[in-house]
Amino acid sequence: MLGYWRIHEEYVKFVLTSLKELASSDPDRVFEYQEAISKMLILNLDPMKPIITPLYSDIGAPAVNQVEIFRSIILHHGLNMTITEFHEKLSVNSVIRTIAGFTKDNVPGIASFYDFMHRLYPIDEAPVLRQPYSKPVKSKENLKKGEKMPPKNPKITAKLTDMIINNPEHFESLLKRRQERFLQKIFAEVSLNKTVELEIIPKSFSTSGDGTPIATGACPNGKKVCKCNENGIFKCTCDRKYSDPNANWGWDSHNECLYYGYSGYFLSTYCRELKTDLPVHLKLVQANRHDSIPTFFALAEFKELNPDLHIDTFISDSASDNYGTYEVLDHWDINAVIALNSTNKGNFKNPPPIGINEHGVPICAGGHEMVHSGFNVD
């Protein structure tokens, strides 16, 4: 069961009181972490308590320090440390320990950190034995710079479109299976809602969606557990141990290379006041997943998690230039600003427009304004 939860107001009071005492003897030591201190003091994690409560049983020993552990997970990324390095720092660095919300007597073991992360992202990451992955052969001559690998199933977007429009209950059941749903909900409640409350992001806004390669540190060839090498057999097909069993091969269209890992798909919006892109939804998919597929799921998940917010316009590269995406966006009352796929050039039934006038009306090859739904006597 979920134990005592220190509210944000109590946390701020604890940090300011403790740091004041530490600064009185060694101010430079506190000043070194001023950026991390500022971030943690404004990060109110109270809204995440009802989200993670269902992850714990109603009986048994209470799980304490859960909010401090989550804050530590954020801190160790900001300080560019591994979770092991950060846990070691908690025992010897009083400033980091205070920022995380711990005292010297209540720092939990590192197993508590991994248990908490597994609850938030319930996916089996234990090493597995399986056949070696065969690295996909993809010649650079077949793809130009910036061009993405085509989807395995060219009709998948049409199937997803039909499911979303004609069988929404089945599509919603697929959304509930995603492992990152708790992390997405925490992000929406803790970060996004606060950003909207501060009027940094309006309730109706434009968003852009795109995928990015995320390489894993695990070996794509696995680790041999057989004794074939000892017998002089160096190329065997025996099962190997994979430390990251969920990773696979994907294509990095920007750097024109294959990579082993995952693909992150992010929805973001541009903030003119801060002059920067702000993330509004985060999703992790397989590395070989074409960007046109997570587009449907990311937008649907955002709608589910943020019913009071509305995406006015969806902006994307040519990966989303397909009939399915346009139909779904129209079904959800979202405008589309999508780059045209270069592979469609030359497929016009009639000559394409040569320009657009100040009123947004296309100009035909003859220099005349085109007529919407006009009649061609020929």
Image (cartoon, rainbow, N blue to C red):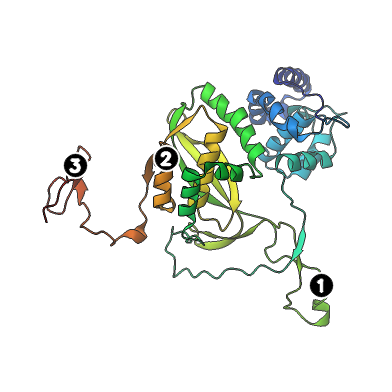
- Residue 354, horizontal then vertical, whole percent: 20, 52
Circle 2 residue: 331
Q: Earlier in the sequence, mark 2 or mark 1?
A: 1
Give the residue number, with chain letter if any, for mark 3.
Answer: 357
Residue 145 vs residue 217: left or right?
Answer: left
Q: Residue at point 73% right, 17% down? A: 13
Label 2, label 1: how far apart the Cα atoms are: 54 Å
- According to the picture, the residue beneath numbered tag 1 turns out to be 226
> Which is nearer the N-term, disc 1 or disc 3?
1
> In the picture, residue 59 is in which quadrant?
top right
Q: Position of residue 325 (x, y in %)?
A: 43, 47
Whether residue 321 is visible: no
Crowding near the residue tagged with mark 1, few <14, some 14–19, many ≥20 C-alpha atoms within 10 Å: few
* Residue found at the very far bottom of the displayed protein: 232
Q: Quadrant of the C terminus?
A: bottom left
Q: Quadrant of residue 260?
A: bottom right
Height in image: 179 above or below 58?
Answer: below
